[in-house]
Image: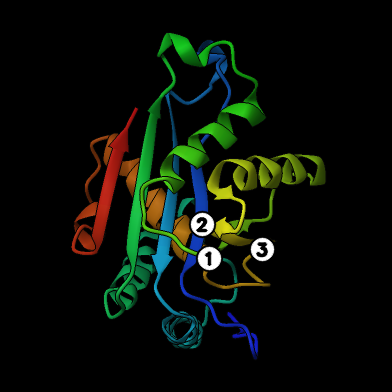
Amino acid sequence: MFILQKGFDVEVLVFMDESGCTGLKFKRGSSPFFIITLVVIDSAEIAEKISAAIERLRIKKDFWGEFHFQKLHKNLRRDFYVMLQNYPVKFYTIILDKSHSYVRGMEKNELYSEVANIVLDVPDLNGASLFVDKRADKEFRKEFDKSIRSKQNNGKDKRINKIKHKDWKENSLVQVADMICGAMNWYIQKKNDYYVMICKFEHEIIRI
């Protein structure tokens, strides 16, 4: 579950996940698009409520694995979105068309960090805590954190206060970013089954 840290006043919580890959070998299976989604929650109190709702859904459906879009049965996907509709979340999705020429000379990690910084520029952030799904290796996480801090923060003016890499067992709300990002991946493939369930949230889609 998401645990509110005592004595830590959080203005905004941001959860990040991606879909697709940063590879450019299209003939070998690289995805044509790379997507990053930010889910923005305005307070730790709302975050706690969503986390508790996820746990209630687990019990109701007797499901104890990860709410991971690609691995879930369609009924569980719909149940998750229905549950989420009870809470005021916002999301921002950036969709990168990797066929653009300026992408070709970039390293995979560089591309990921660059796209992440572009979408992080969109929401109004001030001292936010950023939670990223902990799947990458330590070296990448170190470089990613360095890139985000250098581009998002300016001296005492910190748009991103803390960056934390957590898996779904450490922080259940990273699953919200995964589920919304997965729905957006289907959306760009002209599969609107789940986009219609999340489009009512305040959101913005950026295409580059």
- Viewer-nearest residue: 89 or 22: 89
The quadrant in which residue 191 appears is top left
Task: Check disc 1 and give the amino acid type.
Answer: Gly
Task: Check disc 2 and give the amino acid type.
Answer: Arg
Label 3, label 2: how far apart the Cα atoms are: 23 Å
Do the residues bearing badges 3 and 2 touch, measured as CB atoms within 8 Å? no
List x then y, in percent, for residue 162.
Answer: 64, 63
Q: Mark on residue 159?
A: 2
List x then y, in percent, for residue 90.
Answer: 32, 63
List x then y, in percent, for residue 51.
Answer: 49, 81
Q: Mark on residue 27?
A: none
Side of 149 where 31 appears, left or right: left
The residue drawn where x is 81% and y is 41% is 139
- Viewer-nearest residue: 49 or 62: 49
On the image, numbered disc 1 is attached to which residue? 127
The quadrant in which residue 101 appears is top left
On the image, numbered disc 3 is attached to which residue? 167
